[in-house]
Image (cartoon, rainbow, N blue to C red):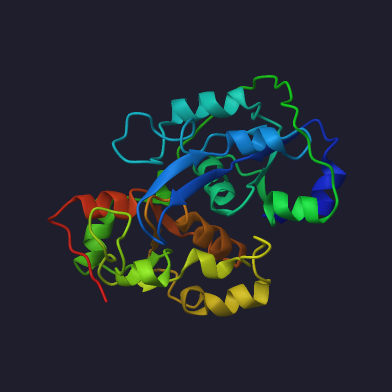
Amino acid sequence: MLIDAPSLYGELDDPQLRVIDATAFLVREVADGPYTVESGRARYGEAHIPGAIFADVPGDLSDPESSFRFTLPKPEHFARAMGTLGVGPGTRVVAYAQESPMWASRLWWLLRYFAFDDVRVLDGGLRSWRRAGYPVSTETPAVEPASFLARARRELVATKEDVLKAVGGEPACLVNALTPRAFRGEGPGAYTRPGRIPGSVSAPAQSLVDPETWCFRPREELASELGGLLDSDPAVPMIAYCGGGISATVDIFVLSMLGRDDVLLYDGSLTEWSADPQLPLEVG
């Protein structure tokens, strides 16, 4: 699931490989506060891995008809977008980001949801690539369109109704991937109302990544950090969420690496949940 920079460098000449820069930025004036979404396309144009193509996760790979950001697109929409990027039968994908790996893990999750499994994430993204001394490019490669078959694996998603059942007492483990401060509902907040879904446990995505290198922490540290979740009853559904379904994919990615590949994503997350004043939230 993870690939390091030297291994990727050794594969760059493979004609079936599609390296995809999935960078986007959440620009905030204060930590955990409201944000604007900034495309990573300009930064991609300044420097990217040679041969890499750019994927607009918040735009082209999200539902344009949704009232919420980053919403899971319809299969036909996703298929068109990935086909345009040259991803189809027989191809392999390596996703990376220029900063936080959550955009690469979101692309990994989207591809997995639409039944494309041959995808890995570059550990440390562009930062690790440059640190290893490999060249970067400013050229946008020509891409031959492909035919992408998108088959939705709906069993990988939890809906608001599923989460409501968990809050109402049905067995489930709700995992909040936001920062501890956001989990407690402190500060200005980025969503309609602050707080967490009742009964949630905190597993911050930021704690799974080295903030200096953007690499995932060593496997044994990740296993220790998430030990309570890894040891939980596999018969009890585990549902990860965050603000808009992006950083929660970091938790899902790591849990999958460690053997729990059955974790569901509540795609609407707090953006959807907090917008409904009838739904409960906990603070403190």
User: How many numbered marks are there?
Assistant: 0
Left or right of 58, for residue 46: right
| Residue 160 rendering spot, x and y as whole percentages | 26, 52
| Residue 138 rendering spot, x and y as whole percentages | 75, 32
Residue 95 vs 188, above or below: the answer is above
* The N terminus, quarter of image: bottom right
| Residue 147 rendering spot, x and y as whole percentages | 60, 22
> In percent of the image, x 41 and y 34: which residue is there?
73
> In percent of the image, x 72 and y 38: which residue is there?
47
Left or right of 112, for residue 45: right
Residue closer to the observer: 29 or 157: 29
Residue 217 vs 231, above or below: the answer is above
Residue closer to the observer: 242 or 89: 242
> In percent of the image, x 21 and y 50: which residue is there?
275
Residue 177 vs 144, above or below: the answer is below
Residue 234 vs 247, above or below: the answer is below
| Residue 80 rendering spot, x and y as whole percentages | 52, 23
> In percent of the image, x 58 and y 43: which residue is there?
23
Quadrant housing residue 255: bottom right
Quadrant housing residue 53: top right
Furthest-left residue in this view: 278
Residue closer to the observer: 121 or 53: 53
Left or right of 123, for residue 37: left
Left or right of 1, for residue 65: left
